[in-house]
Image (cartoon, coloured by chain):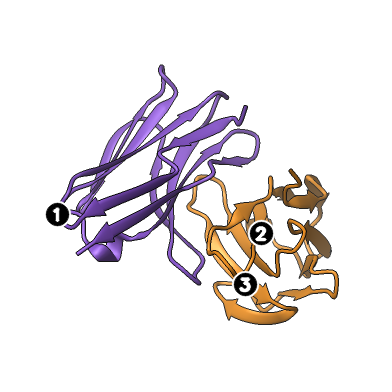
């Protein structure tokens, strides 16, 4: 069993829909990252969380340390949000989820 | 399934020394990315290689160099180390057919 589990693996949505990607982890962590990667590019860091909730534009990330769970929400999704979203946790090193491939259709 | 392998996992060096970090991609993956993550910071893209050629360059200092070899493994060479180079360095690999990157566990470099 992976130490970082993401769901769903693949997600297709219509433009404007509210999207949620989930991440569960089984190790003690000092921080959790949500990363975005577009085709052909490197990763872009969206959020770093150690508690609570953060918001940036249409993106919201939450973390529940007790439940070892984090969610990434995208409001009013747009085709340009199509990418792979990766959850990564900092333990004594970085542990990565397998990623969620999001496709937003116009 | 085979994963991305990095070595060493931990490395301690003194200021002004050199360090070499190695990344072994998943078999048949032809692209390697290097990232640096300082304490409490977001990961930063350093450099990437495709088919043994540099494909993209990020915030890699001039003191650092990297290459990808014929077996597709990559090495990050770091010279004149500074205290600020202390970080987790991780690499990722992918195949040209998809764009999902698979990440290695990282090398934690401590410069004293």
Colour orange maps to chain: B
Query: Could you tell me which residue is drawn at 65 percent across and 34 percent down?
Result: A92
Instruction: Please state the horizontal and vertical placement of residue B69, each as a whole percent of the image.
Output: 83, 74
Q: Which mark is residue A41?
A: none
Per the image, label 1 sits on a secondary structure element best described as loop
Tag 2 residue: B85
Q: Quadrant of the C terminus of chain A?
A: bottom left
Classify residue B20 by image quadrant.
bottom right
Residue B112 in view: no
Q: Colour of chain A?
A: purple
Query: Could you tell me which residue is drawn at 51 percent across and 66 percent down?
Result: A42
Chain identity of mark 3: B
Find the distance from the CA under tag 3 to the CA under tag 2. Answer: 16 Å
Find the distance from the CA under tag 3 to the CA under tag 1. Answer: 35 Å
Same chain, marks 1 and 2?
A: no
Q: Which mark is residue B47?
A: 3
Q: Which mark is residue A16?
A: 1
| Horizontal side of residue B59 vs B9, given as left or right | left
Mark 3 and mark 1 in contact? Answer it, CB < 8 Å.
no
Q: Closer to the camera, A35 or A15?
A: A15
Query: Could you tell me which residue is drawn at 18 percent across and 58 percent down?
Result: A15
Q: Quadrant of the N terminus of chain A?
A: top right
């Amino acid at each position: 069993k992976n130490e970082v589990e993401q769901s769903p693996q693949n997600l297709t949505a219509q433009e404007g829909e509210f999207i949620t990607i989930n991440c569960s982890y089984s190790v003690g962590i000092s921080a959790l990252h949500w990363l975005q990667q577009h085709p052909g590019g490197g990763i872009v860091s969206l959020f770093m969380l150690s508690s609570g909730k953060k918001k940036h534009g249409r993106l919201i990330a939450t973390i529940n340390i007790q439940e070892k769970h984090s969610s990434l929400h995208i409001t009013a999704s747009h085709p340009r949000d199509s990418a792979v979203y990766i959850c990564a946790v900092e333990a004594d090193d970085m542990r990565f989820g397998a990623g969620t491939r999001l496709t937003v259709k116009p | 399934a085979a994963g991305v392998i990095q070595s060493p996992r931990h490395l301690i060096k003194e200021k002004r020394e050199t360090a070499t970090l190695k990344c072994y991609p998943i078999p048949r993956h032809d692209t390697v990315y290097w990232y640096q993550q300082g304490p409490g910071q977001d990961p930063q893209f350093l450099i990437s290689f495709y088919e043994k050629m540099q494909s993209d360059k990020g915030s890699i200092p001039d003191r650092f160099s990297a290459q990808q070899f014929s077996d597709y493994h990559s090495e990050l060479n770091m010279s004149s180390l500074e205290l600020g180079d202390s970080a987790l360095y991780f690499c990722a690999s992918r195949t040209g057919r998809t764009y999902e990157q698979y990440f290695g566990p990282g090398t934690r470099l401590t410069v004293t």
